[in-house]
Image (tube, rainbow, N blue to C red):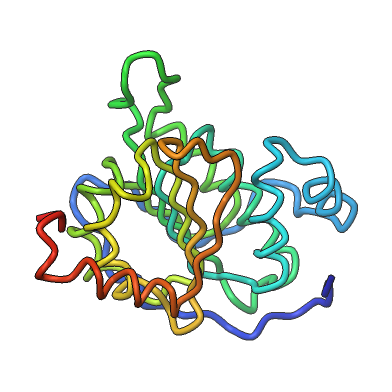
């Protein structure tokens, strides 16, 4: 696995934050930078096991613009940012946008206050934007506000079929080499499925204006 230092650069096309979002500008990190040993612990022993794939991808491809739907505890987001920062340093500040129901999570799910998530992730020194919402309803609203996303993480309760109408919006978000990592609890998924740009474009074509399941 490539573990060289350095970073090719970053894209700064995420646009202004929409209303009711929490945003922090890049600043000095006050969490300890991830060591090489810490990185290997993540990819070999990190829990949940499904997240290890994301850490390996982040170390290899250095996605400096990350968009995530479904933060869970926020730990994964924090560690992903640290994996990229370990190799990019100040050369390419990381931008992270997270969309989650936060306080509005369904009954039975652990609540995760937006302000708590914002405080935790801001400590990394990355530029953080947090938006309340879910994948299906938030995606159409932000598709024209956030561009050049290198890594789109989608962790949802629905099945792949339930998301058919959403793919129409995804190509607008992604950079040329952008990748989607998808985990559908409705399919019984316990690991992430990697979907490259070419497959995303094909899914988007099938969910275009003629598809009655497209999200309004």
Residue lying at 51% horizontally and 58% vertically, measured from the top left: 181
Q: Position of residue 57 (x, y in %)?
A: 67, 64
Q: Position of residue 34 (x, y in %)?
A: 77, 53
Residue 118 in view here: no
The residue sitting at the top extreme is 108
Asked if 188 appears above or below 208 in the picture, the reply is: above
Image quadrant holding the N terminus, namely bottom right
Q: Is residue 181 left or right of residue 175?
A: right
Q: Position of residue 207 (x, y in %)?
A: 22, 66
Choose top left, top right, bottom left or bottom right for residue 36.
bottom right
Q: Nearer the viewer, residue 107 or 206?
A: 206
Residue lying at 41% horizontally and 56% vertically, measured from the top left: 97
Image quadrant holding the C terminus, namely bottom left
Q: Nearer the viewer, residue 42 or 23?
A: 42
Q: Nearer the viewer, residue 26 or 183?
A: 183
Q: Position of residue 208 (x, y in %)?
A: 17, 71
Choose top left, top right, bottom left or bottom right for residue 172.
bottom left
Q: Is residue 116 left or right of residue 14?
A: right
Residue lying at 65% horizontally and 46% vertically, measured from the top left: 51
Residue 20 in view here: yes
């Amino acid at each position: 696995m490539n573990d060289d230092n350095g970073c090719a650069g970053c894209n700064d096309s995420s646009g202004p934050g929409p209303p009711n979002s929490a945003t922090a500008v890049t600043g000095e990190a006050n969490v300890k930078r991830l060591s090489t040993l810490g990185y290997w612990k993540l990819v070999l022993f990190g829990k949940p096991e499904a997240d290890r794939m994301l850490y390996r991808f982040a170390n290899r491809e250095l996605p400096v613009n990350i968009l995530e739907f479904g933060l869970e505890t926020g730990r994964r987001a924090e560690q992903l940012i640290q994996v990229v920062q370990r190799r990019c340093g100040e050369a390419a500040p990381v931008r992270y946008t997270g969309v989650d129901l936060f306080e509005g999570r369904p009954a039975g799910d652990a609540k995760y206050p937006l302000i708590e998530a914002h405080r935790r992730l801001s400590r990394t020194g990355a530029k953080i934007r947090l938006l309340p919402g879910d994948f299906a309803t938030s995606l159409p609203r932000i598709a024209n506000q956030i561009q050049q996303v290198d890594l789109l993480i989608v962790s949802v309760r629905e099945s792949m079929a339930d998301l058919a109408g959403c793919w129409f919006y995804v190509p607008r978000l992604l950079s040329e080499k952008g990748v989607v990592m998808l985990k559908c609890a409705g399919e019984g998924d316990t690991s992430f499925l990697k979907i490259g740009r070419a497959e995303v474009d094909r899914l988007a074509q099938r969910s275009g204006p003629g598809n009655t399941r497209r999200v309004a």
